[in-house]
Image: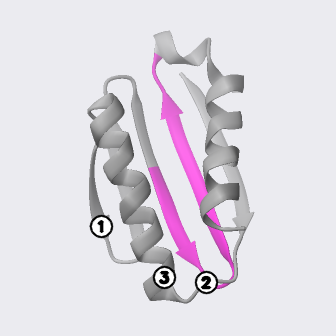
Amino acid sequence: MSRIELQHPHHKSPEQTRQALEEVAGKLHARFGVSHHWDGDTLAFNGSGVDGRIAMQPGALHVTAELGFLLSAMKGPIESEIRRVLGERFA
Protein backbone atom coordinates (compact mmCIF):
# COMPACT_ATOMS: atom_id res chain seq x y z
CA MET A 1 0.00 0.00 0.00
CA SER A 2 1.00 3.56 -0.65
CA ARG A 3 -0.16 6.64 1.21
CA ILE A 4 -0.88 10.16 -0.01
CA GLU A 5 -1.05 12.94 2.56
CA LEU A 6 -1.22 16.64 1.81
CA GLN A 7 -2.54 19.97 3.07
CA HIS A 8 -4.17 22.50 0.77
CA PRO A 9 -4.95 26.07 1.91
CA HIS A 10 -8.29 27.70 1.14
CA HIS A 11 -10.29 30.82 1.97
CA LYS A 12 -13.86 29.53 1.60
CA SER A 13 -16.55 29.39 4.22
CA PRO A 14 -17.42 25.96 5.65
CA GLU A 15 -20.59 25.89 3.52
CA GLN A 16 -18.70 26.79 0.33
CA THR A 17 -16.01 24.25 1.15
CA ARG A 18 -18.56 21.48 1.70
CA GLN A 19 -20.34 22.33 -1.55
CA ALA A 20 -17.08 22.32 -3.54
CA LEU A 21 -16.02 18.99 -2.02
CA GLU A 22 -19.43 17.52 -2.82
CA GLU A 23 -18.95 18.54 -6.47
CA VAL A 24 -15.49 16.94 -6.53
CA ALA A 25 -16.92 13.75 -5.00
CA GLY A 26 -19.67 13.70 -7.63
CA LYS A 27 -17.10 13.85 -10.40
CA LEU A 28 -15.06 11.07 -8.79
CA HIS A 29 -18.18 8.94 -8.67
CA ALA A 30 -19.08 9.64 -12.29
CA ARG A 31 -15.56 9.00 -13.63
CA PHE A 32 -14.30 6.22 -11.38
CA GLY A 33 -17.23 4.81 -9.42
CA VAL A 34 -15.82 6.14 -6.14
CA SER A 35 -18.46 6.36 -3.40
CA HIS A 36 -18.43 8.90 -0.56
CA HIS A 37 -20.10 9.93 2.67
CA TRP A 38 -19.69 12.67 5.25
CA ASP A 39 -18.43 11.98 8.75
CA GLY A 40 -18.83 15.35 10.45
CA ASP A 41 -16.57 17.76 8.55
CA THR A 42 -14.69 14.95 6.81
CA LEU A 43 -15.54 13.62 3.37
CA ALA A 44 -14.69 9.91 3.28
CA PHE A 45 -14.37 8.23 -0.11
CA ASN A 46 -13.56 4.75 -1.32
CA GLY A 47 -13.47 2.77 -4.48
CA SER A 48 -11.53 0.06 -6.19
CA GLY A 49 -7.99 0.43 -4.84
CA VAL A 50 -8.45 3.66 -2.89
CA ASP A 51 -9.66 4.65 0.57
CA GLY A 52 -9.35 8.27 1.62
CA ARG A 53 -10.54 11.29 3.55
CA ILE A 54 -10.64 15.04 3.05
CA ALA A 55 -10.93 16.84 6.37
CA MET A 56 -12.21 20.41 6.39
CA GLN A 57 -10.11 22.56 8.70
CA PRO A 58 -10.17 26.33 9.17
CA GLY A 59 -8.18 27.66 6.23
CA ALA A 60 -7.01 24.28 4.95
CA LEU A 61 -8.01 20.87 3.68
CA HIS A 62 -6.18 17.78 4.93
CA VAL A 63 -6.20 14.97 2.37
CA THR A 64 -5.19 11.40 3.14
CA ALA A 65 -5.55 8.40 0.86
CA GLU A 66 -4.41 4.79 0.97
CA LEU A 67 -3.75 3.36 -2.47
CA GLY A 68 -4.00 -0.36 -3.15
CA PHE A 69 -1.28 -2.35 -4.84
CA LEU A 70 -2.20 -1.51 -8.44
CA LEU A 71 -2.72 2.21 -7.83
CA SER A 72 0.49 2.47 -5.78
CA ALA A 73 2.47 2.50 -9.03
CA MET A 74 0.57 5.64 -10.05
CA LYS A 75 0.98 7.55 -6.78
CA GLY A 76 2.81 10.52 -8.38
CA PRO A 77 0.22 11.20 -11.11
CA ILE A 78 -2.68 10.66 -8.68
CA GLU A 79 -1.20 13.11 -6.17
CA SER A 80 -0.60 15.65 -8.96
CA GLU A 81 -4.21 15.34 -10.10
CA ILE A 82 -5.47 15.84 -6.53
CA ARG A 83 -3.36 19.00 -6.22
CA ARG A 84 -4.60 20.25 -9.62
CA VAL A 85 -8.29 19.73 -8.77
CA LEU A 86 -7.95 21.33 -5.34
CA GLY A 87 -6.06 24.23 -6.93
CA GLU A 88 -8.97 24.81 -9.34
CA ARG A 89 -11.71 24.52 -6.72
CA PHE A 90 -9.95 26.25 -3.84
CA ALA A 91 -7.75 28.90 -5.49
Q: Which residues are magenta?
A: 53-68
Which callout, 1 or 2, points to the residue nearer the camera? 2
C-beta proximity under 8 Å, tags 1 and 2: no
Instruction: Using residue 9 as the reference point, say whether residue 74 is left or right of it.
Output: left
**Residue with the most extreme front position:** 88
Q: Nearer the viewer, mark 3 or mark 1?
A: 3
- Mark 3, Cα crowd under 10 Å, few <14 / some 14-19 / many 20+, is few
Residue at screen point 62% across, 17% down: 74
**Residue 15 x %, y %:** 43, 86
Q: What residue is disc 2 on?
A: 12
Q: Is residue 4 above or below residue 21?
A: above
Do the numbered discs 3 and 1 sit on residues whose CB atoms are within 8 Å?
no
Q: Is residue 43 above or below residue 32?
A: below
Q: Earlier in the sequence, mark 1 or mark 2?
A: 2
Res 90 quadrant in image: bottom right
Amino acid type, label 3: Gln
- Cα separation, mark 3 vs mark 1, equals 15 Å
Residue 26, relative to residue 34: is it above or below? below
| Above or below, comparing residue 3 to residue 62 in the picture | above
Judging depth in this view, the residue of 68 and 59 nearest the camera is 59
Checking the image for residue 38, the label placed there is 1
**Residue at x-position 53% and y-position 74%:** 56
Task: Tell me which corner region of the image, top left, top right, bottom left or bottom right, holds residue 48.
Answer: top left
Q: Amino acid at mark 1?
A: Trp
Tell whether label 3 touches label 2 (CB within 8 Å).
yes
Residue at image mark 3: 16
Question: Does the magenta segment cover residue 43?
Answer: no
What's the residue type where badge 2 is placed? Lys
> Residue 82 appears in which quarter of the rendering?
top right
